[in-house]
Each structure stands twice: as C-alpha cells, then as structure tokens.
Amino acid sequence: RFARLAPTVAQTQTYDGGVAIARQYRVNEQIRVPRVRVIGEDGEQLGVMTVPDALARARINELDLVEVAPNADPPVCRLLDYGKLRYLTSKKERETRKSQKSNDLKEVRFRPNIGVHDFYAKLRKVRQFIGNGDKVKLTVRFRGREAVHQQLGLSLLKRVADDLKDDVRLEHAPSMEGRAMSMVLIPSPTSTVKSERNDNATAVTTE
C-alpha cells in the first residue's frame, strides 16, 4: 500500500468532508519534509509530528498519508484512503464532463421518404443523444422535386417528437433552412434516467 507513487504537482480539489486538498499529491514515502501537521480521517487535528510517526499512524489505521497543503509551515497531511480519493475525484470529473455535454448539439439527418427500419434506427440514435444530455437537431433534407413536399418533412419531425414526447422538450420549432427542414429537441428533466433504464442505445451511423 505504501509503495504507491503519485504526481507531485499540487492543484486544489475538495475531498469528501469539505476539506480542500491537492488534486495531485505527494503520498506516503514521497513526503520528504521532516515534520508535518496531521489531520485525521474524520477531520480531527492530530498535531505536528515527524513523517515516520505519521506514516506509522496511517499504517495502524490502514490508511495513506497524503500531503494536502505542501506550502503550509509545516506542510499539512491528512490520513485517508488514497484509492477512495482517486475514485471520488475521477467520479466528479466524469460528472462535470457529462454536465458540459448538455451544451453539445448533435444532428441526425432524415430523408422525407425514409423507410421504416431506417426511421427507427435514427430514432434510437436520437434517444441515445438525448439520454447523454445532448441537444439534438433533426434535419430533413430535400432533393430535387422533394422540396415541394415539405409537409412530408414536417410530418416526419412531428412523428419523432411524438415518439419521444416523454423524454424531450422542443427548443426550436420546425423551420426551413435552404433545402432542409430542421427542429431542435432538448432533454426533459427525466429523459436521462429513462434513457439509461430503457434504451440499450444501439450504435447507428447517421447520414
């Protein structure tokens, strides 16, 4: 357990319990200073002690000694489960990335005369994007004389919205953009949960 190595670049990150600690740390034998101020796993102040004494206390409790404030005098270390810390940090980063994805705009393209199989394949793709928290732009492209049958495109977009009515909200109503008709759907507050529970999200290549 005490053979772990960790990067030594210190960045601020909040650990469970609200204590600010470095995002990358000196851990256990990486800590080279002679004395440190030690904080227990539950936040109690254990006082200033030598690093060997602090490591011994960590071993007794089956924890790691993590330097959380290297610039303090003396540096501050905390007794904690370093593996748990890395897990919590990684989980928070994943959640942050997921929340940022809500700003992504995905596009799924349809043809006005799309077949039944292709329609449901595209529908699964839209549901997958919505389940990931993305906005989705649905586009129906018209070729040649198809442009005179815009009602077909409107009906197609309405059909998608109706099939996903429990998972989405309409952000932009259908409108023409050149020879294409498009609308934008965004996840409803419960759409991500429903997608994770009900949809296996088969990967389908859009046009």
Image (cartoon, grey):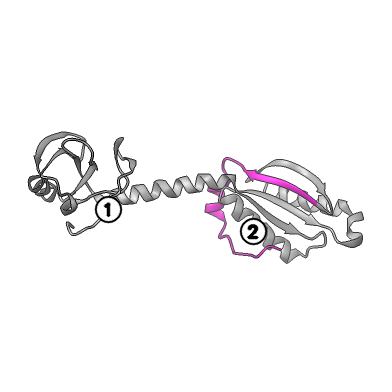
According to the image, label 2 marks what residue?
124
Which percent across, then down, holds residue 109? 73, 58
Which percent across, then down, holds residue 200? 55, 60
Secondary structure, mark 2, is helix
Look at label 1 and name its amino acid: Gly
- The number of numbered badges drawn on the structure is 2
Q: Is residue 184 magenta?
A: yes
Give the mark, 2 or 1, whose residue is nearer the N terminus: 1
Q: Is residue 2 left or right of residue 163?
A: left
The circle on residue 27 is none
According to the image, label 1 marks what residue?
83
From the viewer's side, name the closer residue of 165 and 99. 99
Residue stretch rendered in magenta on the structure: 181-207
- Residue at horizontal 69%, vertical 56%? 108
Look at label 2 and name its amino acid: Arg
Camera sees residue 166: no
- Residue at horizontal 57%, vertical 40%? 189
Q: Is residue 205 left or right of residue 155?
A: left
Reply above or below: 40 against 154: above
In whole angstroms, how far apart are the C-alphas of marks 2 and 1? Answer: 37 Å
- Residue at horizontal 26%, vertical 54%? 6
Reply above or below: 81 against 200: above
User: Around disc 2, counting alpha carbons within 10 Å, would you say few (fewer than 14), some (14 to 19), or many (20 or more)?
Assistant: some
Which percent across, then down, holds residue 23? 32, 46
